Image (cartoon, helix red, strand yellow):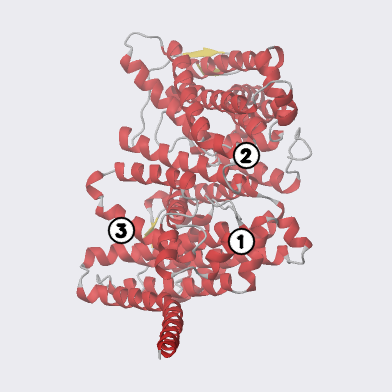
Amino acid sequence: MEYFLSMCVIGLIMGIIYALMALGLTLIFSILHVVNFAHGEFYMLGGYLMIEVLKQLVGLHPLAAVPIVGVLVGLLGWAFERFLLRPMHQGKIERPGEYAVLITFGLSFFLINLALAIFGPLPHRPPAFFEGSVDLGVIKVASDRLTASLVALVLLLGLLLLIQRTWLGKALRAVSQDKEAAAVVGINPLVMNSVAFALGAGLAAVSGALLASTFSVEPTVGAGPSTRSYVIVVLGGMGSVPGSIVGSLLIGLVESFAVGYFPDPSRGLAYRSVFGLIIFALVLLLRPRGLFGRKEA
Amino acid sequence: MIRNVQLIARRGWEQASIFHQRFRQVIPWATALLAVALAVAAPQLWLGDYWQHVFAIAYFYAVLSAGWSLLSGHAGQFSFGHMAFMAIGAYTTGLLGRYLGLSPWLGIVAGTLMAAVVGLGIGLLVLRLRAAYLALFTIAFSEILRIILRSEPQVTRGDQGLRVAPLFGETLSRVPYYYLMFGLLLVCLALMMWLTRSRVGLYLRAIREDEDAAAARGVDVVRYKILVFVVTSAMAGLMGTVFAHYTAVLTPSILVLSQTGLVIAMAILGGVESLVAAALGGIIVQVGLELLREFGAWRMVIFGALLVFTLRFARNGLLAPVLERILGSGPRAESKREASPHAT
């Protein structure tokens, strides 16, 4: 029982962090109808910028660097959306669906190689938020991971408030439901596209910054978190905010249990992401709109 | 008198233009023959060991790149798992050779068949998935395969590398591999071009433009989608088997996503709507990467930037328009113009 509970705790802790990244992807998809294939690279940039920011601003607490990283990558996301995705929504590009897949994939290719050229292929690690570990009763958790999870939780709640309670959130939801109708009442869908993409990119970068000290950063580090986010948003239903949160917690739990109860522990760890991917393949094949998806998705 | 002169002049002009037209028809064939002749003569005349190797690998990428352009550019099936089929071919022959002592040549057949069968399976599974969903599924497939290959080292040798027997005995010469890769490139390219120029090519483009409309007009969507999956997977598998016997050591890193990314970049830079351009894209990028070796990792950054630029401003690729200008407009160019009046 104790073991079971400890697996639950670990699963939920990771699930909350996954949710941050998955929510970014969801936000982008629900507003722009684009699957961001560079999402993992925003995560990777978040990790590297965390290291660089802490190097430049000596004495800054790592926690204070996280928002800076989020804003920087958010700006990059905004610029990318503004110059490379907006033409698509203005009807300047043929076969926009294909274009969206390829251009975000192209950005990912570019960013991975940029990181490789600047930082080299070896993993780097920023200083920890807090040393040591915290005893949660059933299991001891590294305080870094717990910190990341708590920050993620706060951010998630803040984001939900933003979406549900503010004018901006209302405008975003309006655009996601009906672009033309939103435009009629004076919301510029193009601006909302940029806002959503910047927010999504920023969220991915923040989760990268939060996890950099735990998992370290290398140029190809984004592949894991981004495929996991695809798993989550497809499981939860493309474009559904509650779906992606529930999906994250589910995937966190699935991974933790599968690893915890796999007969051969070291192999279980190696297969951690495979369990999610198998669920992913099944959902795609059997119920492509996921748990909470709209019918059209 | 004057009339006669006019008549003769007109006759001459007509004949010249007929000659011109015939000549234009000959240009593509002449260019192709010349290119083939140069490639065949190259190892004997100019290329040293090192460049023979570079070109052998370039031909390998050229087939993959052309295959991806058939699958994605022509049929609109966005697969990010192309290298997975290559790896299936490679590991099939590698493992069969290691555990059953199968000869490399039979291994090549087995690997190709295996890739075709898996391609058939995946093709059947993804029939209902479109655009981004298909891309996501193929990423998942490729990653699952890579993780399994890495995590079962007692079978696959994992990151330590699976040793594979050479095809042509213990020779150090690259020449036989050069010709084998080049021959396979010609065969695969010819087969794919024959496909795209037949009715099948039209069906595939119809499916790309609008699957439902194509189905409504009587195109057997299921059949042709699966056909294109099987053909391109088998070719990727075939190249994988030869690659395995050539490099002699296999690691799961051959199917990391950035390898697939490289193949896709080659196809896009060349031009996804033209198989020849995509294949040339593969060769030129690979050779270009070698030539720019002194720039180290930055050359990939340059290619990445070029890729994004190409996608945004030259959707038809950088080589395809050049080829079209040199060779005159082919049937593909025309159908493309019809299909997309708003070409960028």
SS class, disc 2 = helix
Q: Tag 3, which chain?
A: B
In the rendered image of this protein, does residue B93 appear above or below residue B208?
below
Q: CA distance from mark 3 to mark 2?
A: 39 Å
Task: Quickly name the residue at label 2.
Answer: A276
Closer to us: mark 3 or mark 2? 3
Q: Nearer the viewer, residue B285 or A275?
A: B285
Per the model, the C-alpha gap separating discs 1 and 2 is: 44 Å
**Quadrant housing residue A259:** top right
Could you classify mark 3 by the number of other residues whose Cα lies within 10 Å: few (under 14), some (14-19), or many (20 or more)? some
Q: Residue at x 35, y 21 (%)?
A: A52
Residue A251 in percent (x, y) is at 64, 32
SS label for mark 1: helix
Query: Label 3, on which residue?
Result: B287
Residue B130 drawn above or below residue B181: above
Mark 2 crowdedness (10 Å alpha carbons): few <14, some 14-19, many ≥20: many
Residue at (77% x, 67% y) in the render? B218
Task: Tell me residue B91's x, y (percent).
Answer: 47, 61
Q: Residues within 10 Å of mark 1 (few under 14, many from 20)?
A: few
Which residue is denoted by mark 1 in the rendering?
B338
Relative to residue B338, is residue A26 depicted above or below?
above
Q: Residue at x 46, y 79 (%)?
A: B21
Look at the numbered discs 1 and 2 and tell me whether their residues touch, using CB distance below 8 Å. no
Secondary structure beneath disc 3?
helix
**Could you tell me the amino acid type at mark 1?**
Glu
- Chain containing the residue with disc 2: A
Does the image show residue A163? no
Task: Count all numbered tags in the image, as a single digit.
Answer: 3
Report the mark closest to the observer, 1 or 3.
1
